Amino acid sequence: MKAIQYTAFGTRPKVVDVERPSPGPGEVLLRVTASGLCHSDEFVMAMPEEGYPYPMPMTLGHEPAGIVAELGSGASGVAVGDAVIVYGCWGCGVCAMCADGTENLCLTGMLSPGLGVDGAMAEFMVVDSVRHLVPIGDLDPVRAASLTDAALTPYQAIKSVLPRLVGGTTTVVIGAGGLGHVAIQLLRQLTPTRVVALDLGQEKLDFAKENGAHEALTSEPAAAATIKEMTRGRGADVVLDFVGADATGELAVSCGGVASAVVVVGAGLGGAKIGLTSAPYNMSVSTSLWGRRKELLELVEMAKRDQISIRTTTYPITDGEKAYEDMHAGRIVGRAVVVP
């Protein structure tokens, strides 16, 4: 079968031929119907060889949609032919975090398809347990695949600050790309907050407004002063950084006001730095990693009701290398999805 793999350090992903996998006891084989690309793949491929934690080569792809093709011995709860998406946080299932349903914070170490085991950029993939499957019914798999990360990740981040987002508040979204454009939609659906998006280039700014941003500004230091003017000197109540670079972390702190919250979501190898005299008083800074399976079920229902919609550009698996090049070059608006 065809697969898109990271095959050697310092190289780009390649379309290769590999053996079709078979499910072991308790596992499920999926025929992949759609697989979203994510900048986390770029993060993995930028890791140095020393200390690299994953197998090599590795099939990429941690935003899967598929059809149940085969059940391993002892697997139950789904049937061959069921349409599903895959919850990508594969915890141990027994630690305190997993017992609470927070497998994304598994205390013994989380694995994910495409981030530790072979993922969904292939014609077939193996899922370790039926508990990581979420039925989608007749929802379009291309529309549903990226719910697993591009929607789930901002959803958890927003829920962590939801009590703050009352009437009259302002929320800044830094980065209106794959995750950020969904965050804007979620903020508009879930809260009365005013949403200000920051990004680079008029196309991205227009895209942010198409998805519900009240205002869209160029992501530069001067944006903080504009946001202070909008809020009569107070600053934003919440800032969501979907880039995670040092520059955006500094901008996030500058945009926030007294007692505000900054949530760093992007894996840009940087972040927000604060101190008592270098940031607004009582500002809280946190990170947010992925989300819970229960939250993914909630997002599926929202998608079925047309309350959120992920902008996608599709590629056949034979064009997988081009898909990654387009993402790397910043040519994707929204999310790229490979359709085997």
Image (tube, helix red, strand yellow):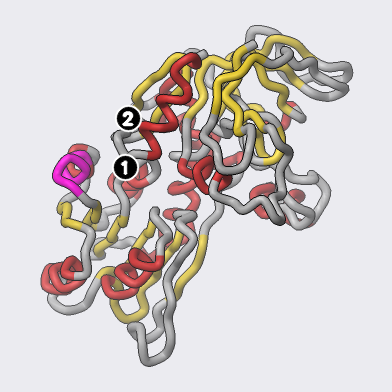
**Depicted 276 relative to depicted 76: above or below:** below
Residue 238, position as x, y percentages in the image:
34, 65
The residue carrying mark 1 is: 181
| Residue in front for this viewpoint, 17 or 136 | 17
Question: What's the residue at 55%, 20% (across, down)?
Answer: 15
SS type, badge 1: helix
Residue 146, label in figure: none
**Depicted 330 relative to depicted 53: above or below:** above
The residue carrying mark 2 is: 311
Q: Quadrant of the N terminus?
A: top right
204 falls in the magenta region: yes
Question: What's the residue at 67%, 32% (across, down)?
Answer: 58
Residue 73, position as x, y percentages in the image:
88, 16
Instruction: Give the residue type that dot 1 points to.
Output: His
Q: How many numbered markers are drawn? A: 2
Quadrant housing residue 28: top right
C-alpha separation, residue under disc 1 versus residue under disc 2: 8 Å
| Residue in front for this viewpoint, 168 or 211 | 211
Instruction: Report the residue that reaches farthest toward the bottom.
Output: 277
- Which label's residue is closer to the chain start, 1 or 2? 1
Q: What stretch is highlighted in magenta?
A: 201-207
Quadrant housing residue 13: top right
Label 2: few (<14), some (14–19) or many (≥20) C-alpha neighbours in 10 Å = many
Quadrant housing residue 174: bottom left
Label 1: few (<14), some (14–19) or many (≥20) C-alpha neighbours in 10 Å = many
Main SS, magenta residues? helix
Task: Determine whether label 1 and label 2 are within 8 Å by CB.
Answer: yes
Instruction: Give the residue type that dot 2 points to.
Output: Arg
Side (left or right) of 311 relative to 108: left
244 falls in the magenta region: no
| Residue in front for this viewpoint, 113 or 8 | 8
